[in-house]
Image (tube, helix red, strand yellow):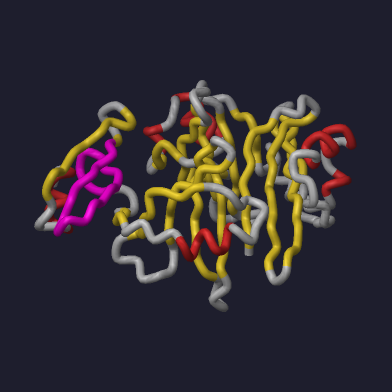
Amino acid sequence: MNATQAIKSRYPQATQIQFKTLVNELLWNATFTQLSIAYQTQVNATGIVSAVLKRLDPGFTPYQRLTDQLSIRGGTFSDLWAVDADTSSTRLMAYTLQGTTYQLTYNESATGKPVINLSPLPLYAITSLPELPQRIQAFFSTNSTRLRFQSGQVIQRASGPITYWLTAVYQAGYSTSPTTILLFFDEMGNLTWSGCNATNTPVLYKPNSQVGDATLLATTSARYPGFDQSSSLAFETYYDGLVSVRYVFQRPIATTTESWEVGAQWPTGQLVYTTYRAN
């Protein structure tokens, strides 16, 4: 079964099926329409390999009411999507703030409390190792007894180089915490930030003041005025000469806590990633 047949088997009335190459001969973005509703997904040569998103009418008022109460207020919304056949509250949308477009994800906790996550808008999702540069594939091959690739996204800020935001998990038999690891690579496939140590040494969570150094903390925290609640969610890791630092800056407001998570290199201070969460 090829990709077109896979779409037609799940969406028999699909029309206007179009493909755009993401990774040459390996991965394509697919868009189509069924019953006047627009859909998009990713496919390989044999079938659908990612969630199918369904475009929704642009009803952004409930989400704007939430962001208006947060430090990320003032942005503009566009492109509202839901995961097809998903009955949960999860919604994906673009959110442009101060000239930068993010992906805003909305869902609800088990108690019905709104949860908002903000991260860079991805170009596309990585669904398998062969879609990655050879150097990243070699990294996972070298670490195959310990780490297993899980998922990833390709990110490009403005017109800059692309970066790979990947998630890995420990292989069975490794109980090191955390069990899910973030790994960041540059366009050439060089590791730029690691959520785990090169050895099986566990990650130790500490207050922000106990990782990196005072200069790096002051420079980084200055970007998030008012986010001064002390937390013990920070850590630093060591991987073949690369020292990765994670800071978490928090601010409680009413019944919500806002958090900025920031990954940087030490001692250079190079910023690798930032994400936001309100819950």
Quarter of the view holding residue 236:
top right
Q: Residue at x 56, y 68 (%)?
A: 114
The image shows residue 254 at horizontal and vertical percentages of: 72, 69
Magenta residues: mostly which secondary structure? strand
Q: Residue at x 63, y 30 (%)?
A: 192
- Residue 36 visible in the picture: yes
The residue closer to the viewer here, 101 or 127, is 101
Indicate whether 273 appears above or below 54: above
The image shows residue 71 at horizontal and vertical percentages of: 67, 53
Q: Residue at x 32, y 54 (%)?
A: 53
Of all residues shown, which one is farthest toward the top? 188
What is the count of numbered marks? 0
Quarter of the view holding residue 34:
bottom left
Q: Is residue 187 left or right of residue 243?
A: left
- Check residue 120 for magenta coloring: no
- Residue 176 visible in the picture: no
Range of magenta residues: 28-48
Indicate whether 177 appears above or below 142: below
Indicate whether 43 appears above or below 187: below
Q: Is residue 238 left or right of residue 69?
A: right
Q: Is residue 95 left or right of residue 201?
A: left
The residue closer to the viewer here, 83 or 256, is 256
The image shows residue 229 at horizontal and vertical percentages of: 82, 57
Q: Is residue 81 left or right of residue 229?
A: left
The image shows residue 174 at horizontal and vertical percentages of: 62, 53
Q: Residue at x 13, y 52 (%)?
A: 14
- Which image quarter is the C terminus in? bottom right
